[in-house]
Image: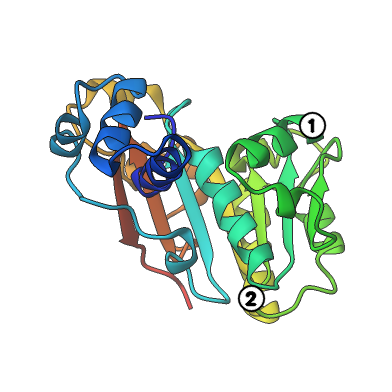
Amino acid sequence: MTYPIYLLKRQARRLSRAKNIPLHDALDQIARREGFQAWSHLSSAITRQADPEPNLVSAPGGLLLIGARPGQGKTVTGLIWAADAVRSGHRASIFSLEETEPAIQARLLRLDRRDVVTSDRLQIDLTDGLDADHIISRLGAAQPGDIAIVDYLQLLDQNRRSPPLRDQVTRLRALAQEKRMRIACLSQIDRRFELSGKSLPDYTDVRRADALGANLFDKAYFLHKGRTGLVALSTSG
């Protein structure tokens, strides 16, 4: 689907008010836009009736992995998480090697987050050669509850002068704990997942998981074809 299901419900409520139509009609219209026959069809295609709100998936001081194949909603999930932090009075930093600033702003506008786009609590950093050292340097003044989104994990060590990926993620986790902030790393999922028969990816499907180990992230949030799953991961403390 284009967006997580809780956001589709929000869009349906807005559509209902804008067109003065019953909510069930608006839900069906949203479902058809997403390629389903009706809302009931969409609902039956997912294992959960609602996604957790992004603010619930990681406590302050936590490091979260958001993993999905392309087009499944991981970037949208990260942006919603950041935008909701801004709306609640925290700062949000988006570090990306994938998106342009106009593209990120356009996504936020489509998500009905115009106020976030113009907020001085939102920082968008698209520095070439982005790595953990740079991220840490930009978050020196972070406060408890602030959020950082890293788009995406597997690009952090593309610069040969940057430390190995595991070392960088270890430093980001230490930063999250020290500042009592929340950091989410968007992650690629290996294409072999699509041949696995599983309805959702898991940590073994994370691209370059062997270079990371499983003890760095507090939680992982996976998305695929409207299904979502939040899992706790063992951590080293």
What percent of the width, then of the height, locates residue 43? 18, 39
What percent of the width, then of the height, locates residue 178? 68, 80
Q: Which residue is mark 1?
A: 102
Q: Nearer the viewer, residue 28 or 53?
A: 28
- Which residue: 70% across, 73% down? 89
For the residue marked with disc 2, what is the amino acid?
Answer: Gly
Q: Nearer the viewer, residue 178 or 42?
A: 42
* Residue 69 left/right relative to 142: left
* Residue 41 left/right relative to 152: left
Q: Residues within 10 Å of mark 2 (few under 14, many from 20)?
A: many
**Label 2 vs label 1: CA separation?**
26 Å
- Which residue: 19% across, 21% down? 37
- Which residue: 82% across, 51% down? 118
**From the viewer's perspective, is residue 92 above or below residue 154?**
below
**From the viewer's perspective, is residue 110 above or below residue 88?**
above
* Nearer to us: label 2 or label 1: 1
What percent of the width, then of the height, locates residue 105? 74, 38
Q: Nearer the viewer, residue 228 or 138?
A: 228
Q: Residue 30 shows which numbered tag?
A: none
For the residue marked with disc 1, what is the amino acid?
Answer: Pro
- Which residue: 26% across, 30% down? 28
What percent of the width, then of the height, locates residue 210? 45, 43
Res. 104 image quadrant: top right
| Label 1: element kind | helix
Res. 42 image quadrant: top left
Q: Which residue is mark 2?
A: 145
Res. 192 image quadrant: top left
| Label 2: element kind | loop
**From the viewer's perspective, is residue 52 above or below residue 29?**
below
